Amino acid sequence: MKIPYWIIGIVLFGSFACDPKEDPVPVDPELEVKEAIFASMSEWYFWNAELPATVDYSKYNSNEALLDAIVFKPLDRFSYLTTQEAFNNSFVGRNAGHGFGFAFAADERLYISFVFDESPAGKDGWKRGWEIVQINGKAIAEYKTASGSYDFKLGNPDPGISNTFMFKLPDGSSTTRTNVKAEYQSNSVLEKKIFDLGGKKVGYWVYQSFKATAGVSPTKSTEVDASMEFFQNQGIQELIIDLRYNGGGSVAVAEQICNYLIQGSNSNKLMYTNKLNSLKTKLNTSRNFYKIGTIDLDRIIIITSRGSASASELVINSMTPYLDVVLIGDNTYGKPVGSFPLSSYNTTLKNNDVELVPITFAIANSAGKAEYFDGFPADFSVGDSPQYPWGDERDLRLAAALSYLENGTVSGRMLNTYFKPKWEMIDAFKGLGQEFPAY
């Protein structure tokens, strides 16, 4: 007769308990988490063949130090650790901080580049185009580091932290604001507008990050739905999508956007394929387009920068075989790979609230293009103009996009303004923050 396993367990436990020499050795929780990180990487990491055969965990004083030591440095700038709550909150727009971004203009002055409506900065009335003159009483130049980057020392995103900013406003006046970080719900859509270009209706859509709407199933963004319905109702004949500060986010929302943009004639055709490591080939998948709505375009203009990454590049890559995709601005960041969180596959990570988010798959479009670690090159290199509000035709990148739609090219006058800053906001962030860069 077979003895139930649970009985065997009790018998064995009883015999071990009688011998003090066999008392279990206490497990070091920190060591256990490090072992779980390495085990999960060995199983799921896209470049798992490049991992070291063994690891001396005693060399690393943190989980982050361990991960940094074992990732495939030639290509991996993306794998990170966070908490389960932080990961889940970010992908539905639950943030903490001041709630704004900034960018340099060609004269190397620093401006607010975007503001989230419900953030502390948004509620205080901050606007794109305000020049940042001082932070906490120090001129911007004083924050420049020896490497040419900037460290503005604004602290972590925790609610309650305050910083004081002096702004020069577009009318020439100045204002000083002390702003306290808090939790807020961020919006993805920063602007939607219609231009009349010689009798042709041109939609302009500023989309800041691919965030899903919490509680909506299947995963999607209701902001995307509302925007696309707006453009459909306006009967647009051309579309400019502004992704210049969009660091990525939800792949499901990127698919949603692609399904609005694809022509009806290309519905059900291949959007992209995912490739996992050699241990997980059975999980390789492909996604087809499924047409949503009535927008029917032959081309789209996308405004880009080095801050355009991840899901932004997925949209560019997936649409290119089917539409004429014209990039105006600067080369994109270069992230042809993706991630999903691994705590649900490892009890130790889950119980210790460690969310491991390494690169787990590569993405190829229907033409097989999967290698763009250097980013997508801009068709027309045009400098940023954060000193102007969204939708203002003095914004050089927007003006260049309108010029291309009207004339089929971009004037040399605009191209000559091109300025490539050595440091951009995306450079100040790593890991989860790089997907959703905001202060």
Image (cartoon, grey):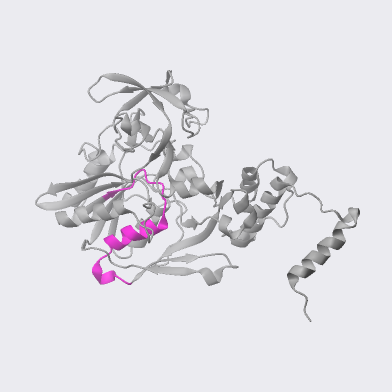
Q: What residue occupies the far bottom of the structure in this picture? A: 1
Residue 352 horizontal side relative to residue 429, left or right: right
- Give the magenta-colored segment's residue range: 241-268
Q: Position of residue 263 (x, y in %)?
A: 25, 66
Identify which residue is drawn at 68% across, 49% down. Answer: 34
Residue 234 position by quadrant: bottom left
Identify which residue is drawn at 44% across, 37% down. Answer: 96
| Number of numbered labels in the structure image | 0
Residue 88 horizontal side relative to residue 411, left or right: right
Residue 421 position by quadrant: top left
Verify whether residue 239 appears in magenta: no
Viewer-side residue, 71 vs 320: 71
Q: Position of residue 102 (x, y in %)?
A: 37, 34
Q: Position of residue 381 (x, y in %)?
A: 32, 44
- Quarter containing the C terminus: top left
Residue 227 horizontal side relative to residue 135, left or right: left
Verify whether residue 248 appears in magenta: yes
Identify which residue is drawn at 69% across, 43% down. Answer: 60
Viewer-side residue, 60 vs 182: 182
Q: Position of residue 427 (x, y in %)?
A: 47, 39
Identify which residue is drawn at 25% across, 50% down. Answer: 240
**Is residue 50 in sight in this rendering?**
no
